[in-house]
Structure formats: structure tokens, C-alpha cells
Image (tube, rainbow, N blue to C red):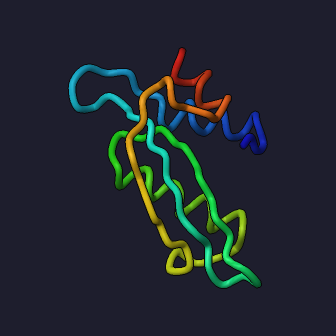
Amino acid sequence: MITSGKNRLRFFYCYHHKKEKGDNMAKVFRITGRVLGKEEPMVFTKECKALKEEDALEFIYSDIGSKHHVKRTMVKIEEIKEISEDEITDLILQKIVSM
């Protein structure tokens, strides 16, 4: 699932790329959910890199809301889980994590 390569790569690298020791090390989250309010519900699975779960949720709400023109209340998160580098399916995110 790759969308707008250059801008997305630049955003992830500038905002989420933190390699520090301790609790400040960025983690990769896989978030699944539904978008209500359209003709039929849209199901999504997205991966993002963030320092904590709340930051990942903020990114997802922002991303889904801007691309599909829906409010945050229409985005229902079903599952959020931290995944390892081996489980990443997003090719751009794989490149960023391996840097």
C-alpha cells in the first residue's frame, strides 16, 4: 500500500525518524479500523512509525481525514499493535526503518 512516495518519505523521515537510546526510540505500529459516513464502510490497515501509541493514532486520524474528507469521529479504530521490523509490509516504511 504505497501512496505519494516522495512526500510521504520526506514526512516520515523528518517527523518520525528518531534513533535514540531508551524509551525515546521510535516504534512501528499497525493500525486497523473502519471509516464510516460514506456509502459503505471502508476498512483500512496502515503502518506508521511513532514514539508512542497516541502519536500513531494522531497520524492516522490526520491522514485518513485529509485523504477521505471525514471527521475524526467517523474513523473507528479496531486494533492498534506494535510490530517488529520483520512484519512491516509498507515498502517505504521498511526503507526508513532500515536506515
Depth check, front residue: 35 or 61: 35
Residue 98: give x, y in percent of width and height.
Answer: 53, 16
Quarter of the C terminus within the rendering: top right
From this view, report whether residue 49 is shown above or below residue 31: above
Image quadrant assignment for residue 6: top right
Image quadrant assignment for residue 58: bottom left
What's the residue at 70%, 74% (across, down)?
69
Residue 32: give x, y in percent of width and height.
Answer: 52, 57
In the image: residue 61, left or right of residue 92? left
What's the residue at 35%, 39% (across, down)?
51
What's the residue at 76%, 44% (across, down)?
3
What's the residue at 21%, 25% (across, down)?
22
In the image: residue 86, left or right of residue 34? left
Residue 13: give x, y in percent of width and height.
Answer: 56, 30
From this view, report whether residue 26 is shown above or below residue 21: below
Depth check, front residue: 91 or 59: 91
From this view, report whether residue 45 is shown above or below residue 29: below
Outermost residue, left direction? 22
From this view, report whether residue 22 is shown above or below residue 57: above
Residue 1: give x, y in percent of width and height.
Answer: 72, 43
Q: How many numbered discs?
A: 0
